[in-house]
Amino acid sequence: MDAMQQVIKSFGLALVGSMHPRMLWLSLRPFLIVSVLWGCLIWLTWTPALEMLSAFLTASMFTSWIQDGLVWAGFENARAWIAPLFFVMLLIPLICISLLVLIAFTTVPAIVAVVSRQSAYKDLDCKRGGGFLGSFFYTLWSALICLALVMLTLPVWWMPPLVAVLPPLLWGWLTMRLMSYDVLARHASPQERDLLLAKYRWPLLSMGIASGMLGAVPTFFWATSALALVLFPLVSFVALWIYSLIFVFAALWFSHFLLAALKDLRRDELEAVLTIESRVIESEHPHHG
């Protein structure tokens, strides 16, 4: 089976698996943790953060130009909601990254354990190429890189073409890195992981970007609610749970794809070894006609 067929097959298996009650619970748990933590933080910082942001936006030539343009376009109350809108735009990537990191660190191992018990993968040996500390530092480093990229590109997110391109690319890259490492941490050796990530770099990145595009749906939903602001708390919680479901689906997708790829890699290596051994034996004991 080639890579594209395996991507499609894994997608179907992940879609079916994500409907299981256990997977729904695994999506609910990190959502609840992140919601409580960020809910408390936003509640404590909302007023002072808006005051600081309003002062910054008033002094900024770039944002004052945006405000003037909105007023000119007929949005008379633009100055009142521009600061809350910018604050929400800053919060969305921070909350999404924290949710993805939490799922990768705490939920993906449980998902891999469930998938690996299926008949297709139950014979895979565990070589434990990644441990707790390795996963922690890899996750932290990847999240920091993604956060830096988000902060660098955030000023242009409001532009119509880029808002549909940049978030899926960033979430896709981070999803690929975190899911690939954590899915293979238990079963693959470091050498096998490096081989698989090099061999399937583009299929994995395309899977990550596809997951990122699915994640962009609640981003648009969230950004639209931010304009109304009245519905922001309710809609943000709904969007966050959708994110959590998508990330759990992505974990299932990567698990099925990478465990199948690891199984194929070991089968090919075994066949290569057996072929070499048979040739050695044949050269040592040639058949005489």
Image: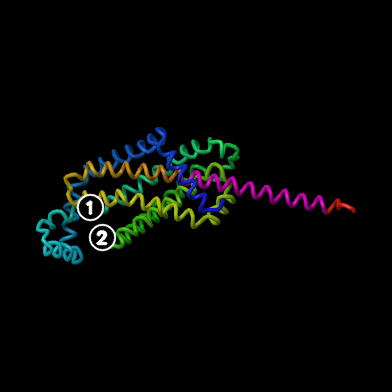
Instruction: Kindly identify the amino acid type of the residue bearing the numbered disc 1.
Output: Phe
Q: Is residue 264 magenta?
A: yes
Report the residue marked by disc 2: 158
How much space separates mark 1 and mark 2, taking CA atoms?
A: 13 Å
Report the front residue among 5 and 87.
5
Horizontal and vertical percent for residue 13? 47, 42
Instruction: Kindly identify the amino acid type of the residue bearing the numbered disc 2.
Output: Trp
Report the front residue among 4 and 40.
4
Horizontal and vertical percent for residue 145? 40, 56
Q: Can you name the residue that lies furthest to the top here?
A: 21
Horizontal and vertical percent for residue 140? 42, 49
Pair 1/2: label in front: 2
Report the residue marked by disc 1: 87
Tell me where the magenta segment starts and ends, as one range.
253-282
Residue at 46% x, 52% y is 177
First along the sequence among labels 1 and 2: 1
Report the front residue among 194 and 257.
257
Residue at 27% x, 53% y is 90
Main SS of the magenta segment? helix
Mark number displayed over residue 10: none
Q: Quadrant of residue 251?
A: top left
